[in-house]
Image (tube, helix red, strand yellow):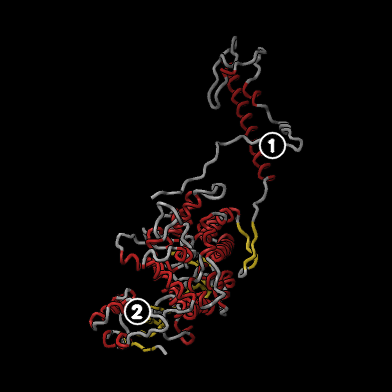
Amino acid sequence: METYLKKTTHPGPMTPVLRSSSNRAPEPAKNASSRSQRITRKTKTGRMADKSHSTPTGSTPTGSQLGSAGMSDKELLQKIIDNQGQMLTDLSTLKNDFSALIAYLEKTKKPLKMKIINDPIWGPIELHPLCVRVIDTPEFQRLRSIKQLGGISYVYPGACHSRFEHSIGTSYLAGSLGRALQKKINEEGPKELKISDKEILCLELGGLCHDLGHGPFSHLLDLMFYPRVKKKNDDLPRWTHEDNSLQMIDRIFGRITYDDYITLGDIEFIKELIKKPLGGYRTYKNQPEKQFFFEIIANDLNSIDVDKWDYFSRDCHMLGLHHNFQCERTIKLAKVVEHDGKWHISYPKSEWFNLFDMYYTRFTLHRRAYQHPVAKAVEIMITDALLKADIWLTFPPGAENGKCLSKSVTEMDAYMWVTDDVLHQVRMLPSNADDDIDDAKRILDRIHRRDLYRLVGENKITWRDQPNQEKKKEYRKSLEEWMKQEKLQKWMKQNEIEENHHRLYHTEYVEFNYGNKDRSPLEKVKFYRNDKSAKLTDDEISAMLPTKFEQIYIRLYWKGEKNEDPNKTILKKFHEMEEEWAVFVPTKRTDN
């Protein structure tokens, strides 16, 4: 695979020249000697020493070079000593002149030109010049055409914001949290955790670039479309949108100038902030004590990170939903504290309720928006249309050697064109050219006419007992069969349901939790008290928390049109799931 990453190079070092307002070089310092004076000096005899015989710095001059004719050994030795002393004086003068020049350049250079934008969530945001360079690239501008919430805008009309503004907001929060930690660490220690301004810039760039790899309608491509198309084509590689985010970063930094602010090694650090290496737990430049950096943008320890802080606040604002979590307060109270020999971002014990509000916001958004039954119906329809049109779509559009949608995900030149606009490309395909094209266009037309797939059954799955972790793995594996439609297909064949009915049903696995499966999310949060590691006991919070933290549903969708009804035998089988699935106790819900 072609790699676009290359270090930006510049011409060789240049000798700086200072210019006055009259375009003339300034007068040299009084104690400075010209280069020619240092190279050639008059000897005692009045002759000018030949430049070809000048003595290299650090070597001992010969008698002929010093004009030693008629001199005794003692006089010659003294002459050599005097000459070496003069050379040291000249080098010292040169060093002082160079230091003065550097100081002058530092004093007179233009300050960094920060760009200020107004964000509806965080207000005025300052953007570092290198962040602006990244934003002003085709790879980043592509995010304007990818909705943050996918098909949810068909339920909540105001939810039309994009990955573009979310990425800028995440960058801002990453810098804010980084600077808050920097101030506390640099003032209070420990010294080995000291955070530099360049590390803050890397955090901002990581937040800016973390979603570059998203495809049409955000998670629809990698969580709904690609798994289904890969099931039919085993030759397709495993893929996630984070993989493409890293490749997009390579493309961007292969195009822009960056080495006036960061190095090639810093770019690798930025990529690790987004997706950890496959080699195990992340460390920063072989500094295990700085692993807390990886809890800022993509926190796989307890899910408290700036990515979620931005999209919780932004999504609630655009959806018109209220939330109580205040990330500004959390940023001010965050500290890096040692827990069992490792440094983690930690919060005061008194902050547990605000953090629980964050987890509750997550649950609320999934329950009311992200997993909304109608929004999921729309996304299932879009997925079906894209599966039908897959091989007929070409990226870049019209290219002779373009890639179809399913193969574009690993080819960045093609993937650059894969955005929400793909639906317009489906509509532009020629009618009557193929049945799959006509089916895809018909599905999209149904979305416009609001003739959506119907939710005809929903079973709430709860544990019959309290299984151990091994049992839970078995149960979840059985649930995965629903995600792959295997249970439903098996039932249909056993009951001799007509094969054309198989394609008219879709089962969807839906999971609601607080971010830690069926456990309290606060169990994984690191707390401190008096700057020391502290644990939150059950007695302190148990009376304030729910008794259950997870709900699992299996939904059944009917794909028929409004004037058609689902097969009653299939619905009956779906609602008899308790007999088929003894490990669960379902709570039944039917279509009204």
Which circle, 1 or 2, is nearer the viewer?
Answer: 2
Residue type at mark 1: give it. Answer: Leu
**x and y percent of residue 77 in the render?**
57, 19
**x and y percent of residue 384 in the render?**
39, 71
Q: Answer with mark 1 or mark 2, whichever residue precedes in sequence.
A: 1
Residue 505 got which mark? Answer: 2
The answer to which quarter of the image holds residue 19 is top right
Q: Is residue 408 above or below residue 340?
A: above
Q: Is residue 504 visible?
A: yes
Residue 151 got which mark? Answer: none
Q: Residue sitting at 39 percent across and 61 percent down?
A: 392
**x and y percent of residue 108 in the render?**
69, 44
Q: Residue sitting at 52 percent across and 63 percent down?
A: 145
Which residue is disc 1 drawn over? 18
Q: Secondary structure at mark 1?
A: loop
Image-based side of 488 in relation to 160, left or right: left
Residue extending farthest to the front is 432
**x and y percent of residue 195 in the render?**
54, 58
Q: Is residue 339 visible?
A: no
The answer to which quarter of the image holds residue 537 is bottom left
Image-based side of 469 in relation to 262, left or right: left
Residue type at mark 2: give it. Answer: Tyr
Q: Residue sitting at 56 percent across and 17 percent down?
A: 53
* Residue closest to the eye, 490 or 123: 490
